[in-house]
Image (tube, rainbow, N blue to C red):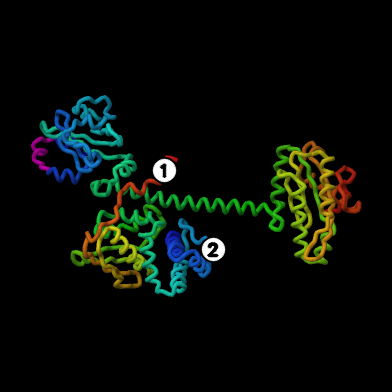
Amino acid sequence: MNPGQELHGGDGEAQGLPIMPEALDRLMPMHLLLNQAGHITRAGPSLQKLRPDQQLAGARFLEVFELKRPAGATRVSDLLRAEGGRLRLTFRSCPRTGFVGLVSKLPGDAGLIVNLSFGFNVIEAVQDYALTGADFAATDLAVEMLYLVEAKTAAMSESRALNQRLHGAKLAAEEQAYTDILTGLSNRRAMDEVLERLTTSASRFGLMNLDLDFFKSVNDTLGHAAGDHVLRVVAEVLRAQTRENDLIVRAGGDEFVLIFVGTSNLDQLCDLGRRIIASLEEPIPFEGEVCRISGSVGLTVSDFYTVPSVEQMMQHADAALYASKRGGRGRVTVYTPELDGMAPAG
Amino acid sequence: MHGLINRAVQCFVRDIYGPQAWAELAASVGVGIEGFEAMLVYEDKVTEQLVSDLARLRGRPASDILEDLGTYLVTHENTRAIRRLLRFGGETFLEFLYSLDDLPDRARLAVPELDLPQLRLSELEPGRYILHASSHHIGFGAVLVGILRALADDYGTLALLELTGEHPHEELLAIELLDADFAEGNSFTLGSGLASFSQEGAA
């Protein structure tokens, strides 16, 4: 329905439709009546509430409001040029609240009626002017909209909190999935991923397999608690001897793998292997007893291969490790092709 | 039952009886100390056990505790959002009472899975009303008594409230309004709950 037509379509009928100003206030608490000279003759109570220090009735409409659409209006009669009677306007003084409005001509020379609404500015407006539900007509959906905004904001903040907790739990689970619980070192799963990444990106790296020697006898003579303690001490030794970026993996019971990212210098790696073994051979006190272990190391580096494959490098490091064990334990062996076929199958 | 309801019980116990009381209740029900997630849905029996274990641990009837829970939801600082959302129901306590018919729908607008009891207000005579609360679960009525008492205070209205009937799927509340302007109510402006919203919008 076009309200303009309704009011001045049939003059007789429209004039025969009396509406009390008080009813207008209640139905449209943000309306304005304008005379032909462009003065406000009546302002709805909610609109007047927005300007407590200024009597709106009597003021010139275009001095109180700045018209955004229709643009370039200088006289009140220009309002009627608005497409569909739709207006956009703001207060000229602060706070410069924005409004959407509808304008319609009153019968005869009675002037214009303008009804205003906050549109999307309603959220700022209710805060700026401390409005209550009574300031809106019961048919205006503003209050329902504000209810929804608040309810959804509350629900959203709960959801966001849940998401954050779940995200934290996910990170913790991921960390656990890549960590050996006893020693806090990385596990096989982490190793597979890192090796895959290093070989795919053709990065330079060193691969060291380390088996503890005499660990089984610690376990057998002093018990599992002693064994667990030794494994934790070994983890500390390995952490102390390596750099932050190196990956230390507990690959199985007493088997460890060390990956040195960006390092393929065999002299350095052999030195490091010997230092590690020397540290492992330090006696480890446990509940009044002393545990003694050593370690055997097998080494290979990515430089040995034109196209390194994870499987092949692991085999070669194992072959070198086996050579160390066979050679009397407590030593470091670097892979050479002559070692092929000497490691026990599996 | 929706996690929001379990979570409300959890926050109530933590804020009113203290963290130790919550830890005991959580252990008794067999949930972790971190408790319930407000945005997940739990089995009904969890909520039933939560309430019955709480009553046992506090040595008080469940209905008394649930009434306190209702009061807590309206008056405590940590549940400010609930008081505000309820106050959207009307400009006066009576208007609010009539808005209760829409409460489950209003709640669903915010949280679609939240299933609150169906409420229906009938007027016996001016100033005297009966509120019918229909639900598969007994206990909402007591919570409502607490909520409505606290809200009547919030509106500055003097009202008598009483749980008068309990049927398998319906609880009845008698409401008597004695003085609509008994005291200065707490103010409720539409914008004051939106500060956080605007900040988030600006961020």
Question: Which of the 4 image quadrants contains residue A259?
Answer: top right
Which residue is depicted at the point 28% across and 61% down? B152
Q: x, y (%) of residue A301?
A: 80, 41
Mark 2 lies on a secondary structure that is loop
Asked if residue A201 can be seen in this view, the reply is: yes
Q: x, y (%) of residue A113?
A: 18, 36
Q: Which of B146 and A200 is in front in this view?
A: B146
Q: Which of A128 and B140 is in front in this view?
A: A128
The chain holding disc 2 is B
Find the distance from the CA under tag 2 to the CA under tag 1.
Answer: 34 Å
The mark that comes first in sequence, 2 or 1, is 2
Residue at the spot of label 2: B32
Check chain identity for marks 2 and 1: say if they share one. Answer: yes
Quadrant in the picture for the C terminus of chain B: top left
Q: x, y (%) of residue B141?
A: 34, 67
Q: Amino acid under label 2? A: Gly
Mark 1 lies on a secondary structure that is helix
